[in-house]
Image: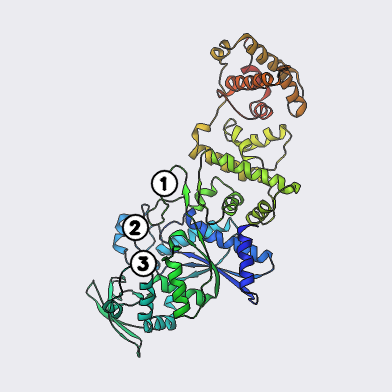
Amino acid sequence: MHWAYEIAERLIEKHPTKEVFTCASGISPSGSVHIGNFREIVTTFFVVRALESLGKKTRFIFSWDDFDRLRKVPQNVPASFERFVGIPYSDVPNPFGEGSYAHYFEKEFEQSLQAFGIQPEFIYQSVEYQSGRYSDYIRIALKKRKEIYEILMRFKSSPFSSEQSEAFFPITLYCDSCNKDTTAISAFNEELGQIEYTCTCGNEGVQSLGGKNRIKLNWKVDWAMRWMMEDVVFEPGGRDHSSATGSYNVSKAIAKEIFNYEAPDYTAYEFIGLKGTNEKMSSSSGNVLTPNDLLLVYTPEIILFMFAKYKPSASFHIGLDEDVLRNYSEFERYQLAYVKGLIKEDIRLTLELACGGSINRQPSFSQVASIFSLIGFNYELLQTSLSRTGEEYTMEEINPISDRVAHWIKYWNPHRSVSINKENNILYYNNLTTEQRSKVNELTELLRNETSLSGDSFMNQIYAICEEDDKKRMRESQKDLFQNVYQLVIGQSSGPRLPLLISAVGREKMVKLLTFS
């Protein structure tokens, strides 16, 4: 059974009378959301799809923790933004235009999700906190701050301190003057709900619960409170939150003992790596590959498929080198098997979670990659070349793949850009053996005289040029012939299937490049 269905069935068994299953995910808009963060939301997305396919109503929420403080200025943001460190993301200005820092990175990610058909209900924590919605629960947390401190200390190796317990407050308070979290609480009046504080900027002030609400619960308390507020039954979390003393287990205890709520079902997910680097992606550092970057090379369905086929606990790397060809070929092979009904159950469910059961008709990525640069990345010539080999596609079917092939070659694999030889490669031809030349000449005559240059009949005639009783030697001879043709036509030792190469280059040009007498 697919892992998303295992989780869905576990949730149904655990909550047999639940009418709506609320599944959650969320992150801070500290910078451009990368594909590692993407695993957060896509894991929830697959569980939601599995629940819905099992007949359950769902609520899919995504929380933007934009009331968190700016901790670090990413590489792609001006260094001058250091002056905003400590201010909520929602109040930091947009480094690239109008609006806020939070809004810019939130909308960037939200727009990329549209390509995947992922449409959660977005919750902006800066709005929720400042609306006063959480005021009663902030009050509860403040009144029970010593109990919260005791819970936190259970998960730490340091000894309990009565002095620290007295001084502990489970909140972040932003200064009314400088708007930073560089504050220290000096007194809390439980009866009036007033908090006195001092700030490193020199300001001394008082904030009231239910008033301006420049107060935010600390992370582990905040997480527990929001589970209760939204009635969450499932939420994944990164490996860093998932240890025995990690955020989930701490928040789980706080949810139960402070807010009287059973923590949701939890699945830990591993991080995604970029092939060729051991560095962890980080939005706050700017070391990222975003979903939008990935969409320039992969279709949304393949990206979803790559994430769906791995259990959340399995790490994997995404490469933009030859891995692209392998990933596309695997996906295309599974799609064909799906259409024919010849596919294993687990892969069938993976495809349905990724594609919603629909299969897009489009040319093979590797096939397009093999000739697109040869024809100058000309879309109409690509359509014509494919048509000559018996593959008819509309431009709407061709464009999604050809756009990505062009980007992949130009920006990630320029060594794959191939051109047709401008003149005959006499030196290479003269270095061939007499037998090798003879086979090239036979193929050239076949090209001159054969009316149909596509289909099995044409290929059989090419194979017949190398006919031998010894099958192993015959295969080696065929491979040798093809390699010589590729070298004489495109200066490479390999290339597209011969009918497609002929279609892309043209019969007359092929014959000219293979004629040496």
Q: Residues within 10 Å of mark 1 (few under 14, many from 20)?
A: few
Tell me the residue that label 1 is attached to: 278
Q: How far apart, in angstroms, are the residues tagged by discs 3 and 1? A: 28 Å
- Residue 468 lies, in percent from the top left, at 72, 16
Q: Quadrant of the C terminus?
A: top right
Amino acid type, label 3? Arg
* Position of 356 relative to 334 (above/below): below
Q: Quadrant of residue 380?
A: top right
Badge 1 marks a residue whose secondary structure is: loop
Q: Which circle, 3 or 1, is nearer the viewer?
A: 1
- Residue 492 lies, in percent from the top left, at 55, 24
Q: Residues within 10 Å of mark 2 (few under 14, many from 20)?
A: many
Q: Quadrant of residue 121?
A: bottom right
- Residue 134 lies, in percent from the top left, at 44, 79
Q: Quadrant of residue 365?
A: top right
Amino acid type, label 1? Asn
Which mark is first along the chain, 2 or 1? 2
Q: How far apart, in angstroms, are the residues tagged by discs 1 and 2? A: 22 Å
* Position of 171 relative to 451 (above/below): below
Q: Quadrant of the N terminus?
A: bottom right
Q: Residue at x 65, y 11 (%)?
A: 435
The residue closer to the viewer here, 346 or 407, is 346
Tell me the residue that label 3 is attached to: 69
Residue 83 relative to residue 484: left or right: left
The residue closer to the viewer here, 289 or 94, is 289
Residue 115 relative to residue 471: left or right: left
Tell me the residue that label 2 is attached to: 73
Badge 3 marks a residue whose secondary structure is: loop
Q: Residue at x 61, y 37 (%)?
A: 366
Residue 222 relative to residue 167: left or right: right
Which mark is first along the chain, 1 or 3? 3
Q: Which circle, 1 or 2, is nearer the viewer?
A: 1
